Amino acid sequence: MRAFTIAALQLLLAKGDNTDVIVREVRSAKARFPFLDMVIFGELAVYGANTADAQPNNGRAETTFSNLARELGVWLIPGSLYEKAGALVYNTTPVINPDGEIVTRYRKMFPFLPYEQGVEPGSEFVTFDVPEIGRFGVSICYDMWFPETTRSLAWSGAEVILHPTMTNTIDREAEIAIARASATTNQCYFIDVNVAGDLGVGQSCVFGPGGEPIHQAGRGREIMLFELDLDYVRQVRERGWHALGQVLKSFRDADIKYPAYGGGTSEALGALGPLEKPQVRKRKDAPTGFDTNTIGKR
């Protein structure tokens, strides 16, 4: 059994600097559960969704979390924070090992456009290996709405997808459905950690490689502890969940050319118009009961 214990921290966070809160919560979790291997929390948990708080790599936040991971001897996935790279800003998740080393960083590929303005998309899929345990992949929030992102991580051997999220809008139920479908169709653990309080609506969720629910949080503070068995992932991929569909093998063996991946765009998608914020409808065009208030930023 390749067992690995994770604590997902769904924290009540305010806008602004949450570093001290996060450090305190991580220390508390490790003190309560000394056998913890990894701690992860939600997207933009450190400073919230203000690009003015972007930091360079190895800035104050990353240094603080590297020292904390080394002190406690845990893998630490501090959600994400805005990374300043010259004139550009990325939404970036650092991955810190128990020696305090940043082993990799993942830049969100699909910023939540047209609302997450001023943020550049990343271009590289990121996986990392935990020695003697297995391979983990990283994606962030809106990425999972594009199933190609999770499939690419599974294609690269990821057995666990770590997915920090910051959602405060009414589509959270849809995201939970996507998280479950992502686990099922890629035969992996899918760990979706949302923020709570002023930044999000919580309802973090964890699904197993058959799509089975392991936990779904409420809307408040929760310290979610769960143990993964990565040998179980291999069994599901080799034999099928309960000896049923061997999804990844069929995907591997299929000789299919997908029109969507041939380059360019389709007439149908081209007709949708530019990617921009919806405008207020003219009164005569608005359906009964349509609310023209702007959508809350994620």
Image (cartoon, grey):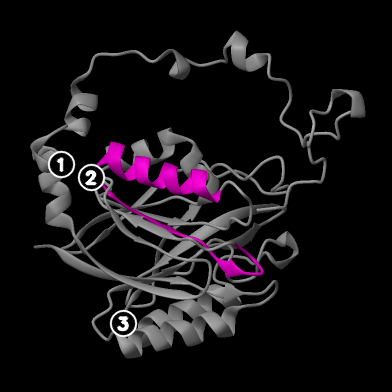
Compare marks 1 and 2 and give the one earlier in the sequence. 2
- Estimate how packed mark 1 is, as few (under 14), some (14 to 19) or many (20 or more) residues with alpha carbons within 10 Å: many
Q: Residue at x 48, y 35 (%)?
A: 146
Q: In x, y percent, where is residue 281?
A: 85, 30
Q: Is residue 184 magenta?
A: yes
Q: Are marks 1 and 2 in contact (CB under 8 Å)?
A: yes
Q: Are marks 3 and 2 in contact (CB under 8 Å)?
A: no
| SS type, badge 1 | helix
| SS type, badge 2 | loop
- Give the amino acid type for the residue marked by disc 1 in the picture: Trp
What residue would you read off at disc 3?
73
Of the pair 255 and 228, the residue shown nearer to us: 228
Q: Is residue 195 above or below residue 256?
A: below
Q: In x, y percent, where is residue 71?
A: 37, 87
Magenta residues span 172-200
What residue would you read off at disc 2?
210
Gap in angstroms between the C-alphas marked 1 and 2: 5 Å
What residue would you read off at disc 1?
241
Q: Is residue 189 left or right of residue 235?
A: right
- Give the amino acid type for the residue marked by disc 2 in the picture: Gly
Gap in angstroms between the C-alphas marked 3 and 1: 34 Å
- Estimate how packed mark 2 is, as few (under 14), some (14 to 19) or many (20 or more) residues with alpha carbons within 10 Å: many
| SS type, badge 3 | loop
